[in-house]
Amino acid sequence: MDASSRIECLTDTRTDILKFIVDWVNNSASDQSILWLHGLAGSGKSTLSTTIANIFREDNLLGAFLFFDRDVTERSDPTVVIRTLAYQLASSDHRIRAAVRAVIEEDLNIWLSPLSRQFRKLIVEPILTITNYFPTIIIILDGLDECGAPADRAALLDVLVKEFASLPSYFRTVVTSRAESDICDAFNFQSHILPHELDIKSHVNYDDILLYIRHHMSLTRNKNRHLQLGPSWPGEEILCQLVEQASGLFVWASTACEFINGYDPVECLEVILRAEATSGAQAALDAVYKTALESIGCWDDESFISDFRNLMGIILVTRQPLSSTAIDAFLHFPENRPCMHVISLLGCVLQQSLRVRVLHPSFADFLMDKERCGRDMWLFNQPTYHRQLAFCCLEQMDRALKRNMCNMTFSGTLTKDKLSEVASYSCLFWIDHICTISDDIAPVLDQMYGFLLQHLLHWFEAMSILNKARDTILQLNKLYVWMTVSILLQILN
């Protein structure tokens, strides 16, 4: 997903917080150069950050917009943030571009340096070489809590806290995240950071969600004119009841509206309204997810349960989202019952574009918490599915990899499209999945040994085709460390 495909705030909603952000940016007297917007999952942080980015892009003030995504490896790696930030800043201004290029030409291995040195050399020093006056430059980092695990992003937080203050005063940085403990510990009580919690209980937020639901009910009426729903359906009283059920969460409103926009909107609305009353935002979100899953109506069908669990398991653990065709290939869904048969029933919680993924990270959280989802058939243990996908990757590579697998001549051009999506994913991430396995490693070692014995050189060739040849040594070292530790633990136990 690129920035152009991200959803903005609905017109005339979030106006107060948008004005607050714009006023803070324009307040040149403030020494607080970082605004930290934090709130619960589903409170609309990403939609808000996208709207902010587009506002400042229109004014030619946007220097960089990074949005993190735990489902996509490239968007959840803290080690690449600074150089990505430098690239976007360089792309926004030719003077910055020239200064950054000079740094890279002088030190081609700058990307191997600690993040603090990367920040000083690739961002601060190039900026300071430019004497001409800049207008305000806005940097937006959305979803910082999705950028790696707490231990992985510690160095990045350190840069935000200690190094960002060295940027010139015309820089303003907006960071959005959940209030995770490591981020709170780093950001609280810092003089240059302005924390601001998104208040989901405010009357303004209530009114915004009401506008959102009213707008989407209008879309449902227009889509289903033959049902004669009436010009004011479902009525103001029902709209207000839905807003109360949302408990201040835009993701609840979004999920409920998608659910109501099904085959029978009247019945779907009744299902939502019949849901038991809850107290608290998370309980309300869990209730709408349970309603969406229960409404599928196939939970006494063992075949459906198996398909659902295999499908959701692979969606939850993939390092980057896969197409439905690739999922079919990995899981061997039969042609007369492809995974899209299940995906089509989950339209209010799954995104069904070119790649299949959960619509919101909170749904993945729900499925991995027994207390929240409440049913074993909805509970997913990630290591189980990492293990399954590791074996799938080895199987797919065993089928696809061979010498000169792309039938290239000496004059041919190596391009990524020479490899299938399944083969490409398997080559890139098989080691990642294997390294999550912590028990019963003997079957994994057996299959892995056979693969390496027959296909190691073929894998090198494939990684070269994918422009990832430099990653092979790092990946193999990671695998070696995992093998050593796993075998040692097995001996000790």
Image (cartoon, rainbow, N blue to C red):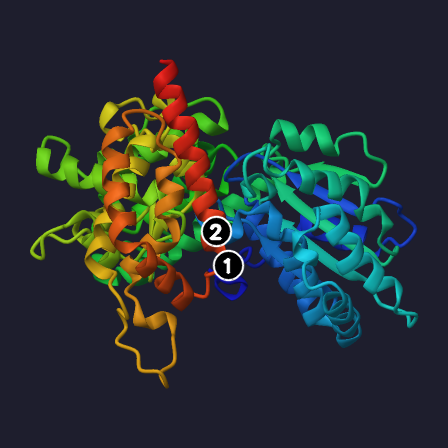
Q: Which residue is mark 2?
A: 473
- State the residue in front, 224 or 342: 342
- Toward which corner of the image does residue 239 lie, by quadrant? top left
Is residue 188 visible in this depiction of the protein?
Answer: yes
Q: Mark 2 belongs to which amino acid? A: Ile
What residue is at 51 percent from the left and 50 percent from the top?
Answer: 211
Q: Is residue 84 above or below residue 269?
A: below
Q: On the rendered structure, is 421 left or right of 43?
A: left
Q: Residue pushed farthest top? A: 493
For disc 2, the neighbor class at 10 Å (few under 14, some 14 to 19, many from 20) is few
Q: Residue pushed farthest bottom? A: 411
Q: Is residue 419 above or below residue 479?
A: below
Element assignment for label 1: loop
Q: Position of residue 312 (x, y in %)?
A: 28, 41
Q: Position of residue 273 (x, y in %)?
A: 32, 34
For disc 1, the neighbor class at 10 Å (few under 14, some 14 to 19, many from 20) is few
Element assignment for label 2: helix
Q: On the rendered structure, is 7 left or right of 137?
A: left
Q: Mark 1 belongs to which amino acid? A: Arg
Is residue 268 visible in this depiction of the protein?
Answer: no
Q: Which residue is mark 1?
A: 470
- State the residue in front, 460 or 228: 460
- State the residue in front, 349 or 325: 325
Q: Position of residue 356 (x, y in %)?
A: 32, 53
- State the residue in front, 60 or 288: 60
